[in-house]
Amino acid sequence: MRKICSVVGARPQFIKLAVVSRVLRKRFQEVLIHTGQHFDANMSDVFFEEMDIPRPDYNLGISGGSHGQMTGQMLIELEKVFVQEKPDMVLLFGDTNSTMAAALAAVKLHIPICHVEAGNRFGTLDSPEEVNRTVTDHLSSINLPCTQSSLEFLKREGLGHTATVVGDPMYDAFCYYTQRLDGSELQELVDPDGKPLAVPDAFYYMTCHRQENTDTDEKLQHIFDALEALDAPTIYPVHPRNRERARRLAVQGGYKKLLLAQPVGYKTSISLVNHAKKIVTDSGGVQREAFFAKKPCVTVLDFVVWPETMANGYNQLAKPDKEDILEKLHREITFDPAYQPFGDGHSAEKIVEKIEEYWR
Ligand code: UDP
């Protein structure tokens, strides 16, 4: 049986791994490496537990520091694991420092790379994720974009021959786990002090943690001001990256409609998406989930990440500016039930088929 080393490190990668690993293990020996990039119980363990992800064979325990420090340490440690394990292929997901470090380690050892969620482009190397994605795409033997627009970017960079659209494993996960929700997952919300947080009947759901929106008080304050002017409270599970700033601003501003929470597990998050009136986010995953659930979404970013979600205003970009966010949130949006550019909920099978095909 051929051996595949899957490398993950951050929350959205655990979610993609959950659906792919289930299929992969029927036909390959999988060695699972967790770099340690996300390590808090509610950013890592909870996903392994509730999504039945196998225990990692290696946990490198590397997190924090500058981009260079983190990526460099991962490169050194991943190379050691690859030399020891001698995998037939390395399987990578998305666009984190863990992804790029693993790609660099593997390519220098002449191990072929399969990159899931390849091809997205913002059009600026100011974004650290863009750097990670671009490098990884160019080092991979198999690129598996989720959508047609991602394939087009790869073609423009001369990578069309490596690429096949397989659909989005985040859509697989959304379909699979939405069927397994029973409402109890909404009782798991806790506030920043660990006290239970009651979910109101009507609410908005926000996630916001990108460097671009959380590196100054001003932008996050504008976003909070917008939420305070809405007709229902907003539930906001705060990423550890901007926990301190969000808590301080929330206290200073005395916001009544802002419900801060600790990060939630995947099932709670998609349950919040499914029950929210509308979504505000800067997350690539959450803007797709809003689209999957047919909920209007405002993405507070300068860049289109998933052009397919932008059709008919389903997902709209806004500046971190109160008036802009409110204007976009107030627009009436109607979804076309037939429009589904993210595949059929079975991308994991297609991913594993493409991996098998490599040796045929
Ligand atoms: N998510 C979660 N708990 C939270 C916030 C988000 O499980 O408290 C989920 C969300 O539903 C989506 C994924 O995490 O599936 C998105 O991850 P993130 O925003 O960290 O990364 P991105 O998608 O921007 O790469």
Image (cartoon, rainbow, N blue to C red):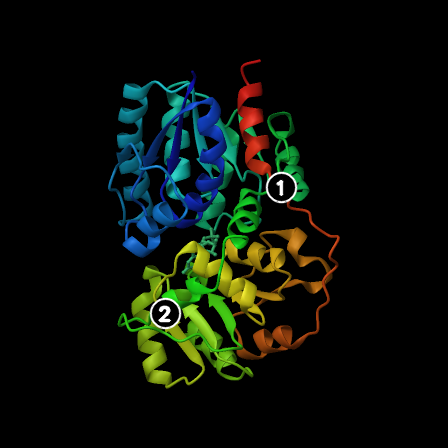
Residue 241: x %, y % from top left = 33, 60
In the picture of the structure, the residue carrying the numbered disc 2 is 261
> Which quadrant is home to the C terminus?
top right
User: Is the residue at mark 2 in contact range of ligand 1, meaning its CB lies under 8 Å from it?
Assistant: yes
> Which quadrant is home to the N terminus?
top left
Residue 50: x %, y % from top left = 38, 49
40 lies left or right of 87 = left
Residue 168: x %, y % from top left = 58, 43
Looking at the image, which residue sits at the far left?
A: 61
Q: Marks 1 and 2: in contact by CB < 8 Å?
A: no
Comparing 39 with 160, the one in front is: 39
Badge 2 density bin: few <14, some 14–19, many ≥20, Cα 10 Å: many
In the picture of the structure, the residue carrying the numbered disc 1 is 150
As measured in the structure, the alpha-carbon distance from the residue carrying label 2 to the one carrying label 1 is 33 Å
Ligand 1 quadrant?
Answer: bottom left
Above or below 44: residue 188: below
Q: What residue is at 50 percent from the left and 58 percent from the top?
A: 270
Q: What residue is at 47 percent from the left and 51 percent from the top?
A: 126
Amino acid type, residue under disc 2 in the picture: Ala
Above or below 199: residue 46: above
Residue 89: x %, y % from top left = 44, 22
Precedes in sequence: disc 2 or disc 1? 1
Above or below 236: residue 75: above
- Label at residue 259: none
User: Is the residue at mark 1 in contact range of ligand 1, meaning its CB lies under 8 Å from it?
Assistant: no
